[in-house]
Each structure stands twice: as C-alpha cells, then as structure tokens.
Image: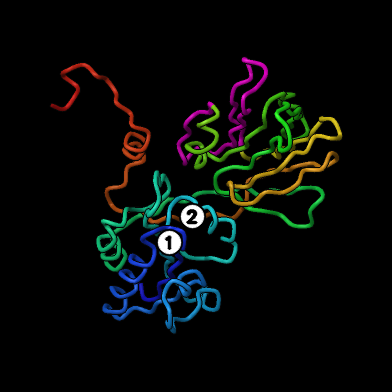
Amino acid sequence: MQHFGIISNPYKESSLQVSQQVINWLLEKGKSVYIDSYTSDLIPGNDYPSILDNMDKLDVIILLGGDGTILHTAQHYNKINCPIASINLGTLGFLTTTTKNNTELLLESLLNNNYHVTTHHLLNIELSSQKKSYLALNEVVLSRYNSSRMVSIRAYADGKEINYYQADGLIIATPTGSTAYSLSAGGPLVHPEINGFIVTPICSYTLSDSSIIIPDNKVITLKSVDAANDILKVAIDGQQLMDFNRDDVLSITKSEQTITIIRLPDYDHFDVLRRKLNWRGNSTPENTES
C-alpha cells in the first residue's frame, strides 16, 4: 500500500492527536497521504492533497471516529473504490477495525498485508417524491415526527402485503445494522454474512407484531395510511432526515454497492458481540473467571 486517505470526525476529542499520529507515521514510512476537508481544518497550515481529487489513487481510507463516521462515509461510498480501516474514537464501535490504542498495530498490519476484509451490502432507498436514491449501511426508518400518536404503515414485499403496522415507526435493517436501532427495538441479531432484510416495528400496538427477516432479493415498499395532519420522517442511518408526504412510497432494495471493511487477523464477530453487548454466558462458578 502506498496511497492512504484520512477522514476524521472533527467532533471527537482525540481526532487531532490521532490524525497527526497516523499522518506522521505514514510519512516516516514514505507513504502518500490524502485528507478530507475536516482533517484539513484540524491541522492548520497543512498542504496535504485532497481525498476528493485523488479517489482513483487510494489504496485504503483510514477513518478516525466511530460507527457514525463509517455510516456517513457509506452513504457516499459510490465514490470510493477501496477498503476502509477505522479507528474507534467513539463508544461502542461495532463496525470499527480497532481502537486508538492499537493505531500503530493497524498501520503495521496494513503495510504488511496482514489483515482480511469483510464485505457489507448497502440498502438502496428511493422516496417517490425525491429525484435521487440514497444508500444506507445499517437501516432506514419510517416514523412519526410531530406527535405522540402511533403511525399506520403498510409494508409490502414484491407487491404482496407483509403486514399492516400500527406503531411508533418501522425499521428496515441490514444484517450489518442488526446490532443497531433494530436490536434496540427488539429485533434479532443477524450475522452479517446472511442475506436478508430485517423488518422491525418500533413499539407496536399489537404485541404479536415481531421482527421478520425477508430475502434481500425482494423489493420492500412502505406506504402510510395516516391522517393528513400527521408528519412522518424517513431517517437513513440516523444521518439524513427527509419528509415523508402522505402520498409518498418508500422503496428499499439491496444495492449492488458494497462497503469493504478491513479487519485485523484476530477479528472474531462473536467475540465482538460478547464484548460490546456484555454477554455473560453461564454464570455458574465453573464458567466464570476468578
């Protein structure tokens, strides 16, 4: 690897320190560094070339932030053709590659090609009143906005009705996003290698309304049957918020676009779940550490 892109989350306290650490380390190894506008603002007087002007050169992009930084990047991933490695400066960091304490270990692994990758499909989202499509890595949510009333949503798969939901909203998640909002709303954990959409109601009026996993070769459409004065919103990965008009139709399909995340050699998906979700397993004395 020779050409490294750096994208920083300027709102993380240690962004400047870690950004400078990564850049200095790479320059000492004779590597080329390209930075985004946020990183440029963090480092006064720098003259590093822009990522946007050199996308076709990049071998890898290093993200400094947390899951939100990855989600923001994924929405623009149609412009990126290289894998990403991420250093967690946030809290949970389900998607991130490593922590800031292992920054040099990550950089050495990249230079020595001592890593593997995981590939994640994105959602393609179209709103009938909009003239463009959107990408999501975790989920798209259709929910109420201006009141405490339930919303009424009809969900379809390839034109056949899945269910009529009366709830606070409805989540359509990817397996990658099964550890995010869908999980908080009672949805299942789904391994990222499984191909499917997770449909999860938010605080459903009917207790029997539970999550359902649908093959991701289906076209999912959502329609509102609410009163005209109710305002609904579409949220994409918690990053973008759009109005959902009464006559709108929200369509969700599996995108051909994927995102490739670099993993260190010892990466274990189940170990991540155990640590991030504080699984305790069997608490009998013979199965607990002293």
Q: In this view, does 59 lie above or below 227?
A: below
Q: Is residue 50 above or below residue 187?
A: below
Q: Which residue is drawn at 77% across and 43% down?
A: 244
x, y percent for residue 277:
37, 33
Residue type, label 2:
Ile
Residue 169 falls in image quadrant: top right
Point out which mark residue 70 bears. Answer: 2
Residue 59 falls in image quadrant: bottom left
Q: Distance between the residues labelled 1 and 2?
A: 7 Å
x, y percent for residue 251:
73, 43
Q: Is residue 281 left or right of residue 63?
A: left
Q: If the image is split into quadrants, where does the C terminus sit?
A: top left
Q: Pick whichever of labels 1 and 2 is earlier in the sequence.
A: 1
Q: Which residue is drawn at 55% across and 44% down?
A: 138
| Other residues around mark 1 within 10 Å, as few (<14) / some (14–19) / many (≥20) | many
Query: Does the magenta portion include 190?
Result: yes
Circle 1 — which element?
strand
Point out which mark residue 63 bears. Answer: 1
Judge by depth and name the residue closer to the eye, 29 or 233.
233
